[in-house]
Image (tube, grey):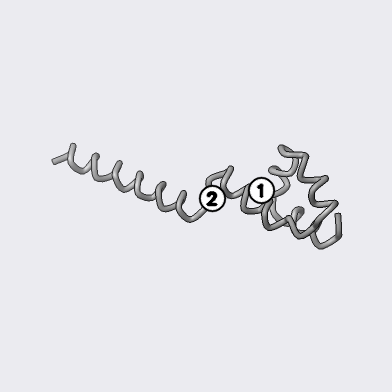
Amino acid sequence: MNIDTQFKIKNNPLLQRYIRENSYWYKNLNRNPNLIEYMNREMKERYKLTTTDKINDLSEKLDLIKTFMNVLK
């Protein structure tokens, strides 16, 4: 694995955690360091950090608040 890829992983605790949980990425990144972007995308999908996940989470929170407000009326 080249040094740039190692720095990217070490500077992001979520990537560190993800690569430890999914060790096949060590082999993939050793063979092709450009796959770090795919790993990052996969990590975001796994940990629900994508934009759509954040919007859905916000929507659920707003629905919960709306429900509480209706109960208080």
Identify the mark at residue 49; answer none if there is no mark. Answer: 2
Which of the pair 45/16 is nearer the observer? 45
User: Residue 13: x percent and y percent?
Assistant: 69, 49
Q: Which quarter of the rendering shows the N terminus?
A: bottom right
Q: Which quarter of the rendering shows the C terminus?
A: top left
Labels in figure, total = 2
Residue type at the position of mark 2: Leu
Disc 2 + disc 1, Cβ < 8 Å: yes
Residue at the spot 69% in from the left edge and 54% down from the top edge: 12
Quarter holding residue 21 = top right
Residue at the spot 48% in from the left edge and 56% down from the top edge: 51
Q: Which residue is mark 1?
A: 14
Residue at the spot 68% in from the left edge and 51% down from the top edge: 39
Residue type at the position of mark 1: Leu
Under circle 2, the secondary element is loop
Which of the two labelled residues, at mark 2 and mark 1, occupies the earlier sequence position? Answer: 1
How far apart in space, not on screen, are marks 2 and 1 (Cα)?
10 Å
Quarter holding residue 33 = bottom right
Under circle 1, the secondary element is helix
